[in-house]
Image: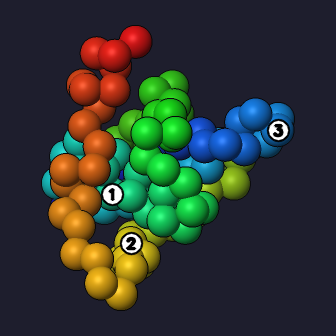
Amino acid sequence: MKVFTVTIAGAERFDGEAPYTWVVEASDMTSAISKATAYHARSQEERVCDLELVPRHTFEGAPPAKCSYHWNDLRTEEPPRGADEEEDTKTLFHPQAAWATR
């Protein structure tokens, strides 16, 4: 597993707040984006379709030691799930599909 930093902007972007940055472990970038997106949607109670990936702040590796932003470490956490829900997070978000609609 590799470490990835994924930054996602949700509804907070309309209030002038900074996006959320998540650090996750995944086998590849697509899986990392899916994992962070699923966690963000659940923890912030937002719909996946309302979230935007911030490509400039999404990369392989952890944030630099003296970065100027706060980040959330999800390397030891599982995405929150509903009691009766068993979603496959790999199908929640596909970055190429998101960019193809713009």
Q: Residue at the spot x=33%, y=26% of the render?
A: 98
Residue 75: % across, % down:
39, 70
Give the residue number, with chain letter if any, for mark 3: 15
Q: Nearer the viewer, residue 101 or 40?
A: 101
Quarter of the image with the C terminus is top left
Give the residue number, with chain letter if any, for mark 1: 35
Q: Residue at the spot x=30%, y=84% of the render?
A: 84
Give left or right: position of 38 versus 73: left
User: As shown in the figure, which amino acid type bears the numbered disc 1?
Assistant: Lys
Distance from the alpha carbon under mark 2 to that under mark 1: 7 Å
Residue 2: % across, % down:
25, 55
Of mark 2 and mark 1, the one earlier in the sequence is 1
Give left or right: position of 76 versus 63: left
Residue 51: % across, % down:
51, 40
User: As shown in the figure, which amino acid type bears the numbered disc 3?
Assistant: Asp
Quarter of the image with the N terminus is bottom left
Residue 86: % across, % down:
22, 75
Is the residue marked by circle 3 packed among few (<14), some (14-19), or many (20+) residues within 10 Å?
Answer: few
Mark 2, mark 3: which one is toward the viewer? 3
Q: Residue at the spot x=50%, y=34% of the render?
A: 52
User: As shown in the figure, which amino acid type bears the numbered disc 2?
Assistant: Pro
Q: Nearer the viewer, residue 27 or 37?
A: 37
Of mark 1 and mark 3, the one earlier in the sequence is 3
Outermost right residue: 16
Please tell me in which quadrant of the rendered image residue 96 appears: top left
